[in-house]
Amino acid sequence: MSPTQFASMDLDRQTTLASWVRVRGVGLHTGHAVEVALGPACAGEGVVFERRDLPGRPRIPVSCDTIAESPRSTSLERDGVRIGTVEHLLAAIRGLSLDNVRVVLDGPEVPILDGSAEPFVMLLAQAGLRRLPAGKRLLRLTRPIEVREGDRFVRLLPARQPEIECVLEFEHPLIGVERHRHRIEPAWFATEIAPARTFGFLRELPAIRQAGLARGGSLENALILDAFSVLNPEGLRYPDEFVRHKVLDLLGDLALLGAPLVARIQAFKSGHTLHRAAVRRLMAEPGCLEEIIRHPTTDSLEVEELEPLPDRASLRA
Ligand SMILES: [Zn+2]
């Protein structure tokens, strides 16, 4: 693993991909087989999704204006066109500090792959990263914001460096209380967070399927728990994989802001609905976010290609 290669991306300049990469897989909720292609975009473009299977190839930029309500996942919608389960891909893009990416799909949902963000990190690494001649855009929180739902909450506090802390609580012998706290940086994301998989409880599956969800779900793309243990034969990737996935989901959902958030992020027993509520509150409260455009510190401003990121084997080492 070369964390420094990821860390070196976290500079003052905007980034994009150096080439196109693609992968095919099933959507967790729709069960549709979909190909997703990821490629370069211009400075200032942000992350833009495109449905190439629809007439006119409609585009949906990632922003708080295109957030759709969806149960157990996060979706984008504009003019009746929808793209489902964007959160793990967005977490990978944000986690690696990428600013501008084109995401082209031939179906309605981002493939779930193995249920984590690791395959997307590998794919983005394969594409190689490129710095652009434009300063990075950040959103700095200026005052505390909190959204609550009973005892669950997402709390955002002003901070000099972006940091995240999630606490998860389930009455289950394998979970109980789990906590993860760390400064948000690419090397940490790639090694400590991206591989954590989505999870669900066997007892909830009939209701989820009844609601028409998780049609593509299997032990290949989700951790499934019965009353005592995890059913997946390979077991857990981390003893606290569950809270790590919660961190992943929250980072992916906060990417809906359209730029990195500089704040101390705290979440207790949160889920997608509460995460979206936090994004909406941030956009609705005047003056709680201050836009910062970084000034590149290096002399040379021409487009520069960086080393491709390491492969899967070296990543975990
Ligand atoms: Zn998730």
Image: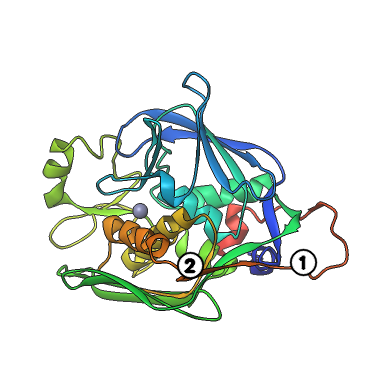
Q: Write the residue at 29% across / 38% down.
A: 29
Q: Secondary structure at mark 1?
A: loop
Q: Position of residue 248 (x, y in %)?
A: 42, 60
Taking 157 as reference, is 301 above or below it?
above
Q: Secondary structure at mark 2?
A: helix
Q: Position of residue 52 (x, y in %)?
A: 52, 25
Q: CA distance from mark 2 to mark 1?
A: 29 Å
Disc 2 marks which amino acid? Glu
Disc 1 marks which amino acid? Pro
Which residue is label 2 attached to?
A: 192
Q: Is residue 46 left or right of residue 82?
A: right
Mark 2 burial class by Cα count in 10 Å: few <14, some 14-19, many 20+: some
In depth, the one of 232 and 283 nearer the eye is 283
Q: Is residue 20 left or right of residue 69?
A: right
Q: Residue furthest top?
A: 55
In depth, the one of 63 and 110 nearer the eye is 63
Q: Residue furthest right?
A: 299
Tell me the number on the disc at residue 296. Answer: 1
Residue mark closest to the camera, 2 vs 1 = 1
Q: Residue furthest front?
A: 286
